[in-house]
């Protein structure tokens, strides 16, 4: 056994021979027994450090109820594990004043109906305690080696937290200073209820200087440092029906917290950002087992969901300088947003969706307009990172379960917006016209084949003869078949323009007077332009 409890000691034959009966503190028998102390002193507390099981015959106990209560208070104040009184010498039965005092202080009181040899009790219990301590030391070495191995190979923080959960068999949460649950891991299947009302519950548990029980729920809490300053803390939540926190769990959590502190010194410290990215990706692909689990995970990171409008935003920064997110130093789009949004009071999750895309989930009051917020974000990003950046906005929703579909729509909008698009701080679904639709399908072989079938002979003719019939066709289609306007745009006489159109009709085998044929060619020319072929405009805004 990793440690002895009062209940364990009562089951030992050397104690069971005394016919022990629990007279008070029945629900505190899970207390850890650190040592056994035999005393007949009236004030033994001055010789105790806490965790001792005190054995006495009751000989020095005062008759005065007030003094007897003071005796119990002194034991309870120092934190003894329990009080064992042997009947037969001073008492024939436990005095009611003693029982009442122990009950009021929730101190286990055990009475022995038969006499036992206290020396045998101390020898037996101390031998078991020393064995347990030796086992704990061996276990501590194994745990230390495990976390050292994880540290040396540069493990992610999720691995440290998962290891702590597996070793303790309890849920373990890593949170930052503002009580956002950055990582939550369990030994078995995920338990979403662990994070229920997390920030509120977390604030009731103070952070000790080292791993120790804290708060009304009896959490085991260990601080996590970052270069000499407090970064956050690691929390183990004991199972409601399981054993209490013991030395082994305390040792494991302390080792895990130390390993996380070292990881912040040697690895990438953007743990909050990683947590946001993880939740956003889980929402995008809906990896949650239930709506409740998704809600609790988002709220544990500080995103309010109930009573708010949720607006998904996808920022594509693949078109910025050199195709990356760097402006100066290590400043990225994700990092920039993570720093700026809290300053402006905007509640949001911000994280990387891919190498060139950042996800943003805004939580806005339902009565407020989302456009000014998104416009401010878009202008700031485009001004900081360049005009090649695209901000795509999905429809606002009121349920977290609807975010997946809205994020998908925002991704489709981002796919459709390319170079040459009108300068706008953000884009929505209504901005997607024919050019944007074809741009989103630019990698589809069927679109490429359609362009070749419709325009291939014309493009080849221009290449062989150095002509520009494709531009003539483009202007004709833009003018909606008005030959006079098109001829004026290309700077040709009507007769010369008509001659070019007849050549185009002959090459393509199409009647340009036919509205259906013009529509087919309009789509093909637009697709060719968005594909960047034949010297066409990269993204015409008006075609």
Image: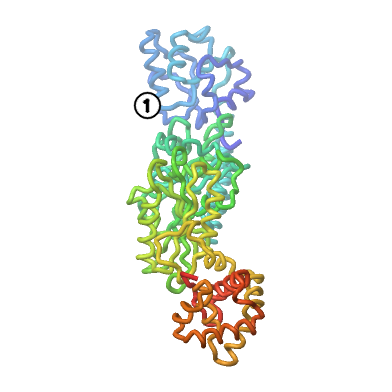
Residue 278 as seen in the image, left or right of residue 374: right
Residue furthest left as drawn:
343
Tell me the crowding category of disc 1: few under 14, some 14 to 19, or many 20 or more residues within 10 angstroms, Cα based. Answer: few
Q: Secondary structure at mark 1?
A: helix
Instruction: Judge by depth and name the residue closer to the eye, 464 or 443.
Output: 464
Report which quarter residue 169 is drawn in.
top right
Q: Is residue 486 above or below residue 207?
A: below
Image coordinates of residue 258 in percent, x first then y, are 46, 51
- Side (left or right) of 76 relative to 30: left
- Whether residue 389 appears in this view of the structure is yes
Left or right of 63, for residue 34? right
Its colouring scheme is: rainbow
Q: Quadrant of residue 452?
A: bottom right
Which of 361/11 is in front? 361
Q: Estimate the x, y position of residue 103 in percent, counting from the top left.
A: 46, 16
Q: Is residue 303 above or below residue 261?
A: above
Q: Quadrant of residue 460?
A: bottom right
375 lies above or below 41 = below
Q: Residue at 44% across / 81% down in the picture?
A: 488
Extreme residue toward the bottom, this view: 465
Q: Nearer the viewer, residue 46 or 521?
A: 521
Labels in figure, total: 1
x, y percent for residue 362: 43, 49
- Residue wearing tag 1: 46
Q: Nearer the viewer, residue 337 or 137?
A: 337
Q: Quadrant of the N terminus?
A: top right
Q: Position of residue 446 (x, y in %)?
A: 66, 70
Does the image show residue 141? no
């Amino acid at each position: 056994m990793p440690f002895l409890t009062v209940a364990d000691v009562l089951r030992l034959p050397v104690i069971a021979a005394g016919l022990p009966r629990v007279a008070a503190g029945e629900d505190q028998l899970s207390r850890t027994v650190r040592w056994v102390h035999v005393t007949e002193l009236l004030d033994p507390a001055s010789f105790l450090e806490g965790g001792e099981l005190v054995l006495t015959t009751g000989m020095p106990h005062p008759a005065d109820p007030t003094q007897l209560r003071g005796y119990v208070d002194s034991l309870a104040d120092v934190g003894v594990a329990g009080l064992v009184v042997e009947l037969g010498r001073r008492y024939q039965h436990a005095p009611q004043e003693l029982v009442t005092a122990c009950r009021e202080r929730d101190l286990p009181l055990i009475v022995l109906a038969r006499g036992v040899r206290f020396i045998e009790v101390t020898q037996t219990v101390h031998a078991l305690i020393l064995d347990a301590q030796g086992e704990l030391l061996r276990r501590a070495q194994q745990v230390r080696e495990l976390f050292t191995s994880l540290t040396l190979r540069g493990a992610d923080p999720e691995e440290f937290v998962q290891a702590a959960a597996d070793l303790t068999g309890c849920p373990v949460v890593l949170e930052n200073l503002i009580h956002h649950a950055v990582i939550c891991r369990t030994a078995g299947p995920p338990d979403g209820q662990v994070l229920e009302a997390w920030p509120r519950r977390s604030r009731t548990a103070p952070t000790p200087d080292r791993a120790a029980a804290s708060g009304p729920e009896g959490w085991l809490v260990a601080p996590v440092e970052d270069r000499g300053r407090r970064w956050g803390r690691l929390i183990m939540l004991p199972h409601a029906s399981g054993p209490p926190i013991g030395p082994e769990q305390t040792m494991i959590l302390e080792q895990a917290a130390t390993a996380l502190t070292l990881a912040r010194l040697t690895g990438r410290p953007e743990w909050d950002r990683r947590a946001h990215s993880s939740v956003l990706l889980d929402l995008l692909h809906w990896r949650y087992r239930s709506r409740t689990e998704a809600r609790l995970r988002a709220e544990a990171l500080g995103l309010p969901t109930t009573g708010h409008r949720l607006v998904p935003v996808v920022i594509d920064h693949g078109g910025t300088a050199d195709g990356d997110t760097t402006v100066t130093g290590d400043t990225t789009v994700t990092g920039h947003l993570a720093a700026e949004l809290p300053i402006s009071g905007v509640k949001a999750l911000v994280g990387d969706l891919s190498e060139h895309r950042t996800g943003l989930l805004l939580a806005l009051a339902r009565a407020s307009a989302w456009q000014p917020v998104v416009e401010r974000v878009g202008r700031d990003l485009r001004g900081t990172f360049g005009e090649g950046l695209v901000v795509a906005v999905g429809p606002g929703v009121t349920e977290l379960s609807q975010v997946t579909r809205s994020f998908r729509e925002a991704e489709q909008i981002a796919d459709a917006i390319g170079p040459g698009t009108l300068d706008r701080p953000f884009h929505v679904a209504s901005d997607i016209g024919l050019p944007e639709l074809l741009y989103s399908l630019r990698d589809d072989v069927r679109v490429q084949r359609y362009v070749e079938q419709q325009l291939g002979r014309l493009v080849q003719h221009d290449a062989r003869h150095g002509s520009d019939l494709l531009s003539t066709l483009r202007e004709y289609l833009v003018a909606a078949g008005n030959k006079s306007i098109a001829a004026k745009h290309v700077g040709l006489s009507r007769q010369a323009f008509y001659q070019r159109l007849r050549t185009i009709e002959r090459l393509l085998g199409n009647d340009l007077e036919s509205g259906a044929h013009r529509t087919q060619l309009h789509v093909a020319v637009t697709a060719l332009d968005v594909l960047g072929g034949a010297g066409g405009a990269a993204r015409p805004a008006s075609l």
